[in-house]
Structures are given as C-alpha cells and as structure tokens.
Image (tube, helix red, strand yellow):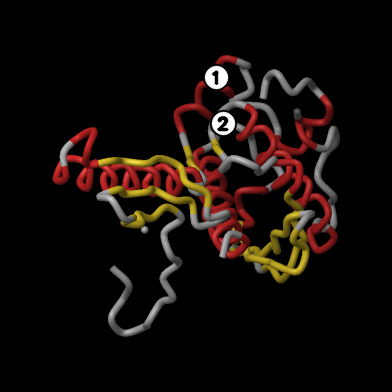
C-alpha cells in the first residue's frame, strides 16, 4: 500500500448507432432423441445435458434454456468492474487515514512544486489508488485480472481535467482513456475526500471500457 506501508490496509443497442453485439458464450443445441445440450461456445464443450426421458419434453427444454441464460448472466457480471464507495470509506476511517496526504501516503514526499512536472506523480497516485481500492474491496475486477497488471500513462491535462491512458501488460496494443479531475490531486489532497471517491469511479469507468475491448 501507499509508499510501501503494507498491503493489508489496503448489457438494447442504440437505434441511431448500430452496435456489434457479442454472441452469448453459452448456448443450447437440440440433439436427436429429445436431448438439449448447453454448450460453451468458447471451446464447444458440453456444460450440461438435459434429456426428455428424465424430465419430460417441456421441462427439459425449458430447463436447458434457463440454465444457459443463468450462465450467460453470471459470465456478464464476471466481466464488470465493481465499485463500493462504502468500502473505501471503511478503509480510510478504520485506518485513520481520512486526513492523510495523498502525496505523503503514496509518494512519501510533498508534491513537486512545478505543477507542469507532475505527470509521473499523477501516474503513481492513480496506480496507488487502484491497488489499494482493489485490495480493500472498493474496486472489484473480473476473474483473471490483477490490479498490478494495469498501467497509467499521463496524457494531456489542464487545470481541471487530466487524461491518462490505461493499458494491460498482456494487451499493450489495446488502450483506453481514464479521465480525472486535476484538483483532486491538489497539494493538500487527502485520502478521505469525496473527490478521491470520485476518482475511483473514473478509474472504474476507464477499466470497464478497457476490459470490454480486451474481451471482444
């Protein structure tokens, strides 16, 4: 966690713009003999088989489609980045960090006096917030993703809005933009401010878009 202080603290498409709908991962194939197979289209393996002779024709068919639907709903949820503001609040309050400086906590120093030279500091602050937020359950990543595999690279920024590019170490050719409010990282910024929780939402949105592109 901050400056090496212990990790333990820490789906109708729009009519005006056609959207390519990704096929559902799980589907039902009707087989001879009144059999319905629920298959995983990622590898074409049979996940479950429903037979009319065991359950009755109507029950077996409906059960197969219901099972596939539930699997697809779970698969969709697994690719969503979650945000819990209360988890972050619990973290900073229980750790008595509400008034702790972001710069001291994550960088171990005061901010650079030259604001135009703070790109590297902003990258470290965003990275630190991501790592801690995931560690304490304020941000939840889909299965197979680890917070440490994401990287922020600072782009253009003004007095009010900054832009950072997010990449994943295994998919460096895919990038997404994360917006943040530069006033959040003012000289006297602390971990307990509402602005920080707002930045967690911005990080969530950027990661969600990036992971959606990776999963296509």
Taking depth in this image into account, of 214 and 62 the one nearest to the observer is 62
Q: Is residue 3 left or right of residue 39?
A: right
Left or right: where 170 falls relative to 139: right
Residue in the image at 39% along x and 48% along y = 38
Residue 174 vs 97, above or below: the answer is below
Q: Residue at coordinates 53% horizontally, 33% vertically from top-left?
A: 138
Q: Is residue 79 left or right of residue 53?
A: right
| Separation of residues labelled 1 and 2 (CA atoms) | 8 Å
Q: Residue at x 61, y 49 (%)?
A: 184
Q: Which label was assigned to residue 69?
A: none
Tell me whether the residue at label 1 lies in contact with that at label 2, contact meaning CB atoms closer than 8 angstroms: yes
**x and y, in percent, of residue 122 in the image:** 75, 52
Please provide percent x and percent y for residue 195: 53, 44
| Quarter of the rendering containing residue 192 | top right
**Residue at the bottom extreme of this rendering:** 16
> What kind of element bears circle 1?
helix
- The relative height of residue 132 versus residue 155 in the rendered view (above or below) is above
Label 2's element?
A: loop
Residue marked by disc 2: 192
Label 1 or label 2, whichever comes before in sequence order: 1
Name the image quarter holding the C terminus.
bottom right
Q: Which residue is mark 1?
A: 93
Q: Is residue 171 above or below residue 91?
A: below
The tally of labels here is: 2
Image x and y of residue 187, in percent = 71, 45
**Viewer-nearest residue: 132 or 184:** 132
Using a 10 Å C-alpha cutoff, classify the residue at mark 1 as few (fewer than 14 neighbours), some (14 to 19) or many (20 or more).
some
Give neighbour class at mark 2: few <14, some 14-19, many 20+ (Cα, 10 Å): many
Q: In the image, is 153 to the left or to the right of 89?
A: right
Q: Residue at x 61, y 17 (%)?
A: 96
Indicate the position of residue 203 as horizontal and vertical percent values: 58, 51
């Amino acid at each position: 966690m901050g400056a090496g202080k212990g990790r333990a603290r820490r789906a109708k498409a729009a009519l005006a713009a056609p959207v390519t709908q990704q096929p559902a991962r799980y589907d039902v194939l009707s087989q001879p003999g009144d059999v319905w197979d629920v298959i995983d289209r990622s590898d074409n393996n049979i996940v479950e088989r429903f037979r009319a002779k065991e359950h009755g024709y109507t029950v077996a068919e409906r059960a197969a489609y219901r099972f596939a639907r539930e699997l697809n709903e779970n698969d969709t949820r697994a690719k969503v980045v979650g945000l819990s503001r209360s988890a972050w609040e619990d973290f900073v309050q229980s750790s008595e960090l509400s008034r702790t400086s972001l710069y001291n906590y994550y960088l171990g120093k005061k901010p650079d006096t030259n604001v135009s030279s703070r790109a590297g500091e902003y990258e470290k602050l965003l990275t630190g917030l991501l790592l801690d937020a995931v560690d304490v359950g304020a941000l939840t990543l889909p299965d197979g993703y680890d917070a440490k595999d994401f990287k922020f690279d600072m782009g253009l920024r003004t007095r009010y809005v900054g832009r950072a590019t997010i990449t994943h170490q295994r998919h460096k050719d895919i990038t997404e933009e994360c917006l943040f409010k530069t006033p959040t990282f003012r000289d006297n910024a602390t971990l307990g401010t509402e602005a920080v929780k707002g930045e967690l939402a911005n990080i969530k949105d950027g990661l969600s878009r990036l992971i959606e592109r990776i999963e296509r």
